[in-house]
Image (tube, grey):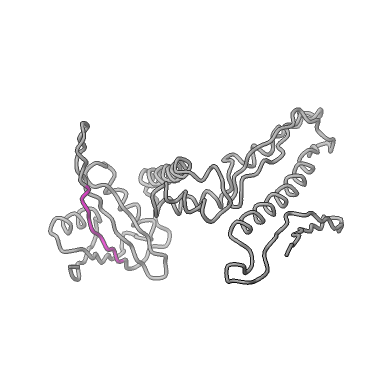
Amino acid sequence: MKWTVKIERIDEAGNLHSTTVGHIERPELTSEADLGLTHDDGKYLIRRVQAEVAQDQVHALISKVRSCRCCGHLRSIKEHRRRRIDTVFGHLRIHAPRFEACGCGRPAASSPMAVLFPHRATPELRHLQVRLGCKFSYQQAAGILNEFLPELSCFNHATTRNRVLAVGKAIEAETRAEIAEKPKVEKPVDHMTVGIDGAFVKATRSKNQRKNFEIVLGRIETCGRQEKIFAAVRDLDDLARERVRSALRSAGRGPATNLTVLSDGEDAMRLMAGQWLNGRVEHPFALR
């Protein structure tokens, strides 16, 4: 049995355009394995649909941005080239021409596609890679994406690691800016519950022996707000205490906010919590 899969587009003028995106051939239904599309069929078709939809979008955008916004004249094309964009459903080679400057002198981007796609990947794909890269090893995350999505060369451990680290650097910059500014909380909460604990990470034996370190981590819960998770390296990071305080401020802690701290009862942890949280702290009970 054979099928032809087509995609139809209606342009702004109401005209209908039809394009064949693929053909499917499947045997007659004689076993449970013959039912419907195979995984590879699905990956192939969705990749083809993605390419067709993206091509129409790019063509419409290029036609729009080529006209000068000031005088309306068409800018001359300086160079025809392709730009690779990675998406969840396949990598694309989109048309990305460079335009000459308009004679009227109004400044405009010579390569609109480069401006629109500075990361050469859609935010959806980058977000998915970061989510999986935080839960699994980079190699496992890349393997999961390659297994279920159309194959992409960007689904490898190096690209996944780089995108996770890029998000980490952005969070680090944002946290340092918040610590430096210490902004006033606009709507502080009346009460906040903080669960806090620590874990030691032992250094591996090597020529460059590193110091063992302790990670302090916890969860902040406030009524009517989303819970927030924080973590800091206690001994090797000079800003560890300030990072915890920054997390509390972002969760809604103000000068009059009452804190309830839940810990495992270990004396050093309870003492550290009292010093770091810097406020009225209650220990209703110790978790064991």
Going 56% across and 52% down the picture, which residue do you hit?
Answer: 124
Where is residue 98 shown, x and y percent of the image?
Answer: 72, 31
Which segment is the magenta one? 193-201
Q: How many marks?
A: 0
Q: Nearer the viewer, residue 75 or 223?
A: 75
Question: Does the stretch in magenta take in 200?
Answer: yes
Name above or below for residue 28 compared with residue 43: below
Name above or below for residue 45 compared with residue 115: below
Q: Nearer the viewer, residue 150 or 236?
A: 150
Name above or below for residue 174 compared with residue 19: above
Where is residue 61 shown, x and y percent of the image?
Answer: 75, 45
Name above or below for residue 242 compared with residue 269: above
Where is residue 228 shown, x and y percent of the image?
Answer: 37, 60
Q: Quadrant of residue 177?
A: top left
| Image-based side of 181 in relation to 128, left or right | left
Residue reaching furthest front?
30
* Magenta stretch: dominant secondary structure: strand
Q: Nearer the viewer, residue 86 or 281?
A: 86
| Image-based side of 284 in relation to 21, left or right | left
Q: Quadrant location of the C terminus?
A: bottom left
| Image-based side of 174 in relation to 97, left or right | left
Where is residue 159 shown, x and y percent of the image?
Answer: 48, 41
Q: Quadrant location of the N terminus?
A: bottom right
Question: Does the stretch in magenta take in 96?
Answer: no
Q: Quadrant of residue 25?
A: bottom right
Going 63% across and 39% down the picture, which residue do you hit?
Answer: 84
| Image-based side of 39 in relation to 19, left or right | left
